[in-house]
Image (tube, helix red, strand yellow):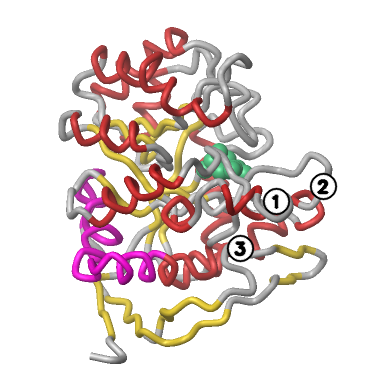
Amino acid sequence: MTNPKLTIRRPDDWHVHLRDGAMLEAVAPYTARQFARAIVMPNLSPPITTIDAARAYRGRIEAAAGPGFTPLMVAYLTDGIDGAMLAEGHAAGVFTAAKLYPAHATTGSAHGVTEVRHIHGALAAMEQAGMPLLVHGEVTDHEVDVFDREAVFIDRTMAGLVRDFPGLKIVFEHITTEEAAQFVLAAGPNVAATITPQHLHINRNAMLVGGIRPHAYCLPVAKREKHRLALRQAATSGSPKFFLGTDSAPHRIETKEAACGCAGIFNAPFALESYAAVFDEEDALDRLEAFASENGPRFYGLPFNEGTVTLARADNPIPESFVTGDIELVPFHAGETLRWRITG
Ligand code: NCD
Ligand code: ZN
């Protein structure tokens, strides 16, 4: 077949940053174009820590995204957050999950958790309630090299979480290392991971060779080539433990192209096409549907989506930037041509 088409069950994005206000209005339609549902990260300023705040934010997302898109809300864990409140929000259908940001690990994590022991009560309540824990898996210790922060987190924190809360569903978010992929594979069925398109496409050279390239910078930072290859293997392996989570994280162009540029890659406009290119290159197009549309809902205990999305192998030139009002955003793959496009 020279111009294959691929029709898959409508996918979901299990990790996205939609922001708020004018940025939300600008970016939500890109996610809603491809995905039926998305896990919406709660690292706003201030973060989403209450049922009322999540309900109100959900309403703003629904208004910005339009009909046919379901935002799945996440509570932002803080030291001493009330486990009963989390369970109540979960039972009420407001909180799908809760997110652990180690304090100061990434954008919007200043209110995050300083020591996991401070949320043991909350984690026990979540385990009891069947509410998934989503983890930004990086240590924040200044002595640990930024390229080692994920692997060190596994030993110092993740292994203990899995041991101490054996019934807790845990998603190791946006994994970037061979160590993380191996850890997830070796753990029980209650441990899974999301993988972003950028960590399947680029290694750290993309950020640092020929000049410093802020639009390839996100956290966790892209690692060496061997890690990218391990992630490609994991994503396309057919294992139900790995699923689609874009970590699309828009920042205005002037805050990316700065002396201290923000971490985050805006990949929402062509996320599915970007994943399709990877699965095609790995000769695994028959496994894209499970990764994009089945493994996530199965892990979360949610129904599969009705409806389908069709992709075709056709040139898809990616714009240098998107402008909405006074917001300019540079997308992942800017100026490149992807080999896949959504046709229906
Ligand atoms: C995210 C953001 O900008 O909110 N940035 C990023 O580089 N991924 C935060 C996060 O998920 O770490
Ligand atoms: Zn994120």
Q: Is residue 42 visible?
A: no
Residue hosting label 2: 258
Q: Position of residue 257 (x, y in %)?
A: 79, 52
Please tell me whether mark 1 or mark 3 is closer to you in this view.
1
Give left or right: position of 45 versus 275.
right
Q: Is residue 304 left or right of residue 215?
A: left
- The residue where tag 3 is placed is 27
Q: Main secondary structure of the magenta part?
A: helix
Q: Are marks 2 and 1 in contact (CB under 8 Å)?
A: yes
- The reply to whether the magenta stretch includes residue 189 is no
Q: CA distance from mark 2 to mark 1?
A: 8 Å
Residue lying at the far front in this picture: please name it. Answer: 210
Which quadrant holds residue 108?
A: top right
Mark earlier in primary sequence (2, 3): 3
Three-letter code for the amino acid on which mark 3 is drawn: Val
What SS does tag 3 mark? helix
Residue interval drawn in magenta: 275-303
